[in-house]
Image: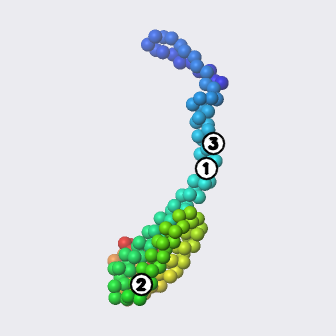
Amino acid sequence: GRRRGALDLATNKTKHITLRKDGLFADVDRLLDDAQRHQEQDQATLKTVQARNDCEHAAYAALSTADDLLQHQPDDKTSVTTAANDLLAYLNAHPDATADDLLAKRKDFDALIHPIIQRAYDRAGQQPSSSSSSSSSSDDVAFDGDSST
């Protein structure tokens, strides 16, 4: 162990202690070892939680967009609503889905609803972006699942 001394300035007495690898220091070492061992699993869990949250956000944003933008296109509104509800049902039925599974579901969801949402924005004379002006000449506008932007 390591021997350390401390001087009490009030009494002018010195006390010595020996620091050993047991007790508090052993607990700290164990906690650090555990954290390092679990780091990879923690990162995978974080990726999965983020993918799940992303899917939920996209589904709810699509439902909101369907309500706001597809009022006069009942077939398109049904398609988007069904796809969003199917995605939410998948999330509920598969609580242990991996991040890769969730990312694949999100990609499929986006491929299905993107053309519908894009047509709706085109009909409305809007672009799905945060800019309220339609001065952009780009035809490449991506729907990110967020109807608030």
Counting residues from the N terminus, which is met first, the one under dot 3 or under dot 1? 3
SS label for mark 1: helix
Q: Which of 27 and 133 lies nearest the eye of the viewer?
A: 27
- Alpha carbon separation for disc pair 2 and 1: 44 Å
Amino acid type indicated by mark 2: Thr
How many marks overall? Answer: 3
Residue to which mark 2 is pinned: 78
Residue to which mark 1 is pinned: 38
Amino acid type indicated by mark 1: His
Q: Is residue 135 visible?
A: no
Q: How far from the left and from the top, in percent, is residue 141?
A: 46, 80
Q: Is residue 109 visible?
A: yes
Badge nearest the viewer, 3 or 2:
2
Identify the disc placed on residue 33: 3
Q: Residue furthest right?
A: 1
Counting residues from the N terminus, which is met first, the one under dot 3 or under dot 2? 3
Tell me if residue 79 comes above or below residue 93 in the rendering: below
Q: How far from the left and from the top, in percent, is residue 101?
A: 58, 69
Which quadrant of the figure contains the C terminus? bottom left
Identify the disc placed on residue 27: none
